[in-house]
Amino acid sequence: MNKNYLRLFDTNIDTSENFTYGLKRIKGLGIRFTDFLRKTLNINHNFSIKDLDSRRIEKISDMLIDPAKYKTPKWLLNKRKDIRTGENIHILSSVLDASLREDIERLIKSKLSKLE
């Protein structure tokens, strides 16, 4: 793989970008969540993605898979009180598209949406 890109959650991230704006390219992550990751990992604001070692990359992917384990505030998650599980979760990448499609189909079936 080319060393100029880091692949996380089906997204190629340019290693010349800084940490916050580089991770923001992953679908489902915004500035606030990436800034929370940066502060939790004690990373400098100007830290570049090319300076990440494999240990920190593993920690980042673990934090993105299970944010509740790292005491992520509920208001920071993108799927609060999921209709199926009732849990607060954070969804990333292609799973975000599938979840949105399921939610829209559920609203159309219950006729609560004006999408028809």
Image (spheres, rainbow, N blue to C red):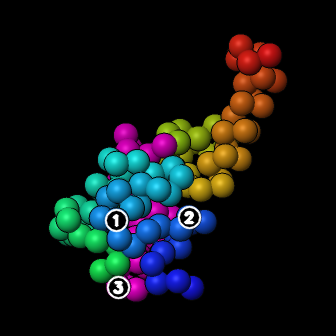
Quarter of the picture holding the N terminus: bottom right
Tell me the number on the disc at residue 11.
2
Whether 57 is among the magenta residues is yes
Q: Considering the image in quadrants, where does the C terminus appear?
A: top right
> Left or right of 112: which side holds 10?
left
Q: CA distance from mark 1 to mark 2?
A: 14 Å
**Which kind of residue does numbered mark 1 sit on?**
Glu
Q: Nearer the viewer, mark 2 or mark 3?
A: 2
Q: Secondary structure at mark 3?
A: loop
Residue 58 higher or lower than 65, as above or below: below
- Secondary structure mostly taken by the magenta-highlighted segment of the chain: helix
Sequence order check: which comes first, mark 1 or mark 2?
Answer: 2
- Residue indicated by mark 3: 53
Q: What residue lies at 23% left-to-right and 70% top-to-bottom? A: 47
Which x, y percent locates residue 110? 77, 20
Residue 16 picture quarter: bottom left
Q: CA distance from mark 2 to mark 3?
A: 18 Å
Question: In the rendered structure, are the residues bearing label 2 and label 3 in contact, judged by CB atoms less than 8 Å apart?
Answer: no
Residue mark closest to the camera, 1 vs 2: 1
